[in-house]
Image (cartoon, helix red, strand yellow):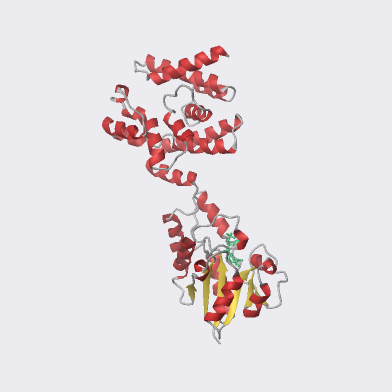
Amino acid sequence: MHKIGIMGGTFDPIHNGHLRAAEEVREALYLDRVIFIPAGQPVLKLDKKLSSAQDRLNMCLLATAGNPHFSVSDLEIQRAGLTYTVDTILELRGLYPNAQLYFIVGTDAAETFHKWRDADKILENCCLVVVSRPGENKGEHSRNYQYLDICQMDISSTKIREAVAKGCSISYLLPEAAAQYISKHELYRDEISRFTAILAAELSRPRYQHSMSVMEEAVALGKHHGADADTLKKLEIAGLLHDCAKNWSEEMPYSQVAEICARGGYVLDGFFAKTPALAHGYMGAVLAQEKYGITDPEIISAIANHTFADQNMSFIDKIIYLSDFIEPTRAPSEDREAARQLAYKDIDKALLFVLELTIRRNLERGRNVYQKSIQAKEFLEEQNGKR
Ligand code: ATP
Ligand code: MG
């Protein structure tokens, strides 16, 4: 009789734990083949955000391509609504009326088996094969089941997703083709890790480190001043991206920088003609939208204002401006230390201190000072005076 193994799962992504389990069951039970069936929308994972069914299916196809005994079916993905294993088993029973079906699950999935819809009906139509998984007890499951102690691989899709999000290697946890698919399609990357990868490739090493450091400083300073989770997320992104245009602005002619800034409504005046790189904040605000897909006006504003400051700055604007000045990879100086101390005491006083210092330094060096900084300083002085 034809013996078919069925390996169901979310496969987000498929990994060597799944593949090795299927291979060992196939050998031990003399199965003719094993079909991997990625779930459409698993009932037990309704609260989790999954990768698209197509991505999960594609990874299964890539991962199993080298094994003639393995195949992949999209029948659960094609089925509308929530995925119930009983529907799958009955469908397979109809497709292969004379085959012996073996449904393979790890010990963790077996634990919850009694909760699955129509568990009895599943067992009437197939044999449950429970395979060992690290950290899980064998347990007692159901009548029609077989337990197999297999080579235990402490690999889970969760661990792989977490590793990708942190930018760590996932080599040898899953077939290389599936790992490459994850990288190419940027799966499991949150905004921060996606942006970090772009900046790491585009910015010089010190500027990249400075960006990371501004991000960390902004979050620390924001937290210190009682920012909520939503604000901290904005600080993180604005800090990371604040210099995203700096390299480009240094290489481009003024006309091009001005044209890009104008797309965001930032009209450059003659001040920038000789030093277009000074407009990198405004240009960064445009790139943040066009290249990084940022739509939040508070993040965009903080990037735009980090070089010169402005009147009426928001909390986020101020924190980014200050973090850019005080972050620890900057050359240490007494002024910087004083600014840092002040930033953790009183944001507005710190802002005024840094603005005055920057204006004074520029004047001493015979440089022009952009009027926005002067206006920002006067605005703050007036506000402080009123207090
Ligand atoms: P997640 O961490 O997202 O829950 P997972 O690694 O547990 O993912 P699933 O797609 O949930 O993978 O699992 C599908 C099936 O494969 C389940 O029956 C599960 O018990 C089994 N399985 C998963 N990983 C292993 C492993 N390392 N060894 C043996 N069986 C495994
Ligand atoms: Mg699981």
- Give coordinates of residue 314: x percent, y percent: 51, 27
Specify the quarter for ligand 1: bottom right
Residue nearest the viewer, comparing 204 with 130: 130
Quarter of the image for residue 277 reads top left
Quarter of the image for residue 101 reads bottom right
Residue nearest the viewer, comparing 40 with 352: 40
Picture layout, residue 271 above or below residue 132: above
Q: How many marks?
A: 0
Question: Is residue 16 at least partly visible in the picture?
Answer: yes
Residue nearest the viewer, comparing 278 with 80: 80
Question: Which quarter shows the C terminus?
Answer: top right
Give the residue at the far front of this rendering.
Answer: 80
User: Relative to 203, is 192 on the left or the right?
Assistant: right
Picture layout, residue 258 above or below residue 383: below
Give the residue at the far right of this rendering.
Answer: 140
- Give coordinates of residue 198: x percent, y percent: 41, 45
- Give coordinates of residue 220: x percent, y percent: 57, 33
At horizontal 46% and vertical 15% (from top left) the residue drawn is 378
At horizontal 34% and vertical 15% (from top left) the residue drawn is 366
At horizontal 45% and vertical 64% (from top left) the residue drawn is 58
User: Relative to 214, is 119 on the left or the right?
Assistant: right
Quarter of the image for residue 362 reads top left
